[in-house]
Amino acid sequence: MANSMSLSDFSMLVGAAPRWCQNALLALDLGFRYERYLAQSLGLARLLQQGYGMPLRRAMTTAEAALKLSPPARVRLAASDGVTALELDVPRYLSRFALRAARLSSDAPPRPGRPKRANRGGGIAAGAAYGLDIGALRSGLRASPAERLERLDANQRLIAALRAGRTPT
């Protein structure tokens, strides 16, 4: 996956709505940089902010520090009173992030703009190589609409007769 990505890719990796991602990046003075490592940090910061009410700047600093550990390990954040603590399971978070990244690579969100046109070059040659009767298709296309309608009616009569168990005449 490329280092730079679209907003929809970035928000999918973060696990948040695109608008939340843009607002968070502006609040953190990061501009609109959509990069994988930033999505990883912001996703963990989002969990800390929403799950534990931690301010976003502090959550981002904590997330970046936790993700820098090598190898990834559980991180224990003790409160200032020494009575409570928060434990971050960084390996589990990285597994969830890897799942989102895999989903993004296999099921990417639609891109803005017109879809790319299909390659129109090899269809006839591929059909002939497969064994289709290209001559019959071409003769059908050369027929007028009235002639095509007449052939369609004849085919329907044939099918109706076969279903009724009669021999077509």
Image (spheres, rainbow, N blue to C red):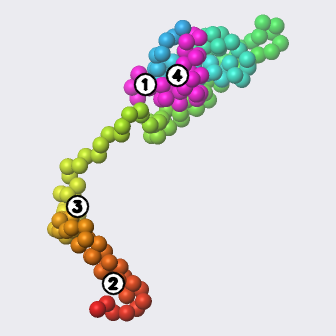
Q: Are marks 1 and 4 in contact (CB under 8 Å)?
A: yes
Q: Are marks 1 and 3 in contact (CB under 8 Å)?
A: no
Distance in Å between CA atoms under marks 2 and 4: 62 Å
Marking on residue 76: none
> SS of the residue at dot 3?
helix
Q: Is residue 133 visible?
A: no
Amino acid type indicated by mark 1? Met
> SS of the residue at dot 1?
loop
Of mark 2 and mark 4, the one earlier in the sequence is 4
Residue drawn at (29%, 92%) of the image: 169
Amino acid type indicated by mark 3? Gly
* 150 is within the stretch colored magenta: no
Residue assigned mark 2: 158
Residue assigned mark 1: 5
Residue drawn at (36%, 37%) of the image: 114
Residue assigned mark 3: 127
Amino acid type indicated by mark 2? Leu
Q: Which of the pair 55/119 is nearer the observer? A: 119
Q: Are marks 2 and 1 in contact (CB under 8 Å)?
A: no
Q: Are marks 3 and 2 in contact (CB under 8 Å)?
A: no
Asked if 164 appears above or below 64 in the picture, the reply is below
Mark 2 or mark 1, whichever is nearer to me: 2
Q: Are marks 3 and 4 in contact (CB under 8 Å)?
A: no
